[in-house]
Image (cartoon, rainbow, N blue to C red):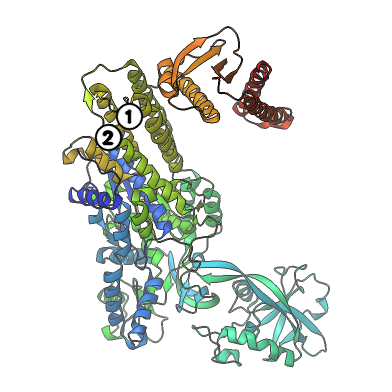
Amino acid sequence: MSIASKYQPTEVENKWYKFWLENKFFASKPDPKKEPFTVVIPPPNVTGVLHMGHMLNNTIQDILVRKARMEGKNACWLPGTDHASIATEAKVVNKLRAEGIKKSDLTRDEFLAHAFEWKDKHGGIILEQLKKLGASCDWDRTSFTMDPGYSESVIDVFIDLYKKGYIYRGTRMVNWDSKALTAVSDEEVIHKEVKGKLYYVRYQVEGTEEYITIATTRPETILADTAVCVHPEDDRFKKFHGKRVIVPLVNRAVPLITDEYVDLEFGTGALKITPAHDVNDYELGEKHGLELINMLNPNGTLNEAATMYVGKDRFAVRKKIPSDLEAAGALVKIEDYDNKVGYSERTDEVIEPRPSLQWFVDMKKLCGPAAKAVETDEVKFHPPKFKNTYRHWMENIKDWCISRQLWWGHQIPAWYYGEGTEHFIVAKTKEEALAELKKKGITVNSEDLRQDEDVLDTWFSSWLWPISTFDSDLIRTGKPNEELAYYYPTNDLVTAPEIMFFWVARMIMAGYEYLGQKPFSNVYYTGIVRDKLGRKMSKSLGNSPDPIKLMEQYGADGVRVGMLYSSPAGNDLLFDESYCEQGRNFCNKIWNALRLTQGWEQSDAAMPELNKFAIDWINNRINEVLVQVNDHFSKYRLSDALMAIYKLVWDDFCSWYLETVKPPYGAPIDKETFKATNQIFEKLLKLLHPFMPFISEEIWHIIKEREVKDALVTAPWPKVDAVDEDLLNQFGLSAALVSNIRNIRNKAGLSPKEQLVLNYKGELTGNPNWDLVKKLAGISEVKQVPEEIANAYSFVSSGASFFIPFSEKIDVEAEKQKIEEELNYTKGFLKSVQKKLANERFVSNAPEQVVAAERKKEQDAISKIEVLESKLGSL
């Protein structure tokens, strides 16, 4: 077979992905005879395109799924997308605006038609990009959180939880996004450190000439103050207890209240209380029965309740109000101040705390089983450090605001009748609402029944992802269908820590609420992909490469390997494009090994004994590494698994093994060695396949013609055989000798073709394979000698001293200098080791094997110094 001189990834990737899809290798159906292995993809937003975080996350998922498939499990990787209410509505609104259309000029149905048109055009882009990566999803199962069946299940859950008393409607302080014009949950608020100002403002005590000074970062909210609060034990203010103070500019008299919430040592000791615009103030307001003045419109401008600056933007007022306070004699001073400010994760708009009538889920009624599941490791976190974060959130859980003031999403199934929104009924359809009202003896005309305008939080649909993607009828039937019963609970979830509360915790809650069991067994938390300077990759910084272009340049396998070179679970990945280059180089190394081995002519000659030794060694080495790889997989150390395979292929197979069995230039290789080499290559391809699916599948079919059913994608994962430790040690001893001799050749400038004589003094601690040493190190003869040899290169290995005599051309003075340099270095090394061993804390606290390793270093250095000094004396 003719093999291309250079690996062509694009051609290979297109060919084999098409092959896998056409032959339904990724498809999965319930099969009681096979163990299921289920993974649901964290559904990317339909607005999204592939970024480096997706690359890492989906590479890890694909590795887990491909390995499970090779282990004979019924692997089902379910893909799909999330409708992403806020982000998608913003995209559609912007598109319409560019076309000269205002959302306000459209009916809800007209707007949704535009939204679905946008989704149909753009929503599948990211899934197509994942195919370029090699994602082995069952694409026939692709789901969308607003598919008809899925949508119905979301509404069913809302109705069910409402009937159980878990969902309620009420006025609460919420996080308001003035750009998206909707409430967002606590988890959707990103707190950033910003440079701001601290304004010191004085409030006159009513009926006196005295003042109380407060400090605020938001002077515009003074207009909505309804109290000033001090600590009850603060002597500075006791004389003002029971009095009222005058709010500057608006001249409103408000009570001075006392509460232990105030920190005696912080700031001026007095706080302005604005219940409508601060979460903590809201709680104090409820506690003390304070008036609530909401001075902001939904879009962030001031309303009539502010009495001043009506219609102006909140930030414009912040700039204007200090001069007005100064003119009124109320401004004391302004200081620079670093402050944490909440921003909307979706729009990057500064969040305004604002009282609003919304729908909420009482999370305390749902969180118990979910908290216990993680605490007891029924759901295991990898790495486990995230259990503490999860526990803290669960112990301090707040009710979930699930209503959003948008049109794109699942419309809340609440129907209002009468004036306002005080009277309502929760039902799936208007007909069911009318029937429910009739049962209650309430007669309402159909045209007078109005559905709630709001939609549900996107996460209220995605928390059902492991359930509703398999069975959208569960809530209605109360019994899982065949698919859900077989595939649930899923096995592994791969996701980012930042959506632990948005999604992971809530899926666990939904799983226990509706199926009485966990939704998955393991959660693998990936780190954040950062650039080599440690900055999070983002469009705004321009430091995030285009994954598609990376794959075009380095190949999908090269990029997959590059992503995993330094991405341990839960730790951030410092990405450098050079990693992808290393991944491509690895592909080229494997390809060159293929070209070498398949280019050998074959003969009927008997297999040399050295080849038998090499074949036994590499098979044992593969078994040894396989044990490590399986252990790494069990602990979700995928980066470590890859590095173990990388070294096995690059060092052990491509370097040691092939160099050992390679015939002389132009000579044929015996058929048995050729056959064994291909079998070894096949084992390595199986280990490589989850990480590098394309090149491994390509070489699998080049080595041997195969039927479709024998494709590598479903080939069995290698089984572990017994490991011959003695054989591994023998090869290791031989390889160490070869490395030492090659090192001498490099240092001395000796030609690789020059045959050398190797002498040694002493008894070896092992039994080297001298045929291997002779072949790979260019040794013509090995002799044991009674005395050290003068005028020779030397090294120490395995308890013996080795000597390679100088030729006449050797510069003795130069050699002395080299030995003296090595001697000085070794003495310095010995000193550092002995210093460490003299440290009682180190010896007492370090693991026993670590201390033992240091003692061995000490003895090796002492032996080496003795040999070097003896050698120096003989010159």
Task: Identify the residue at image location x=53%, y=67%.
Answer: 190
Q: Who is closer to the viewer here, 617 or 17? A: 617
Report the amino acid beneath label 1: Lys
On screen, residue 369 above or below 361: above
Report the amino acid beneath label 2: Pro
Q: Position of residue 819 (x, y in %)?
A: 64, 25
Residue at the front extreme? 809
The reply to whether dot 1 and dot 2 touch (C-beta < 8 Å) is: yes
Q: Who is closer to the viewer here, 22 or 468? A: 22
On screen, residue 565 above or below 539: above
Q: Quadrant of residue 293?
A: bottom right
Q: Secondary structure at mark 1?
A: loop
Q: Position of residue 796 (x, y in %)?
A: 58, 20
Q: CA distance from mark 1 to mark 2?
A: 8 Å
Which residue was labeled with disc 1? 719
Q: Position of residue 597 (x, y in %)?
A: 29, 32
Q: Is residue 161 visible?
A: yes
Q: Position of residue 615 (x, y in %)?
A: 34, 23
On screen, residue 809 above or below 695: above
Which residue was labeled with disc 2? 716
Task: Identify the residue at image location x=45%, y=23%.
Answer: 754
Circle 2 crowding by C-alpha within 10 Å: few under 14, some 14–19, many from 20: some
Q: Secondary structure at mark 2?
A: loop
Q: Who is closer to the viewer here, 820 or 846? A: 820
Residue at the left extreme? 707
Quarter in which the N terminus is drawn: top left
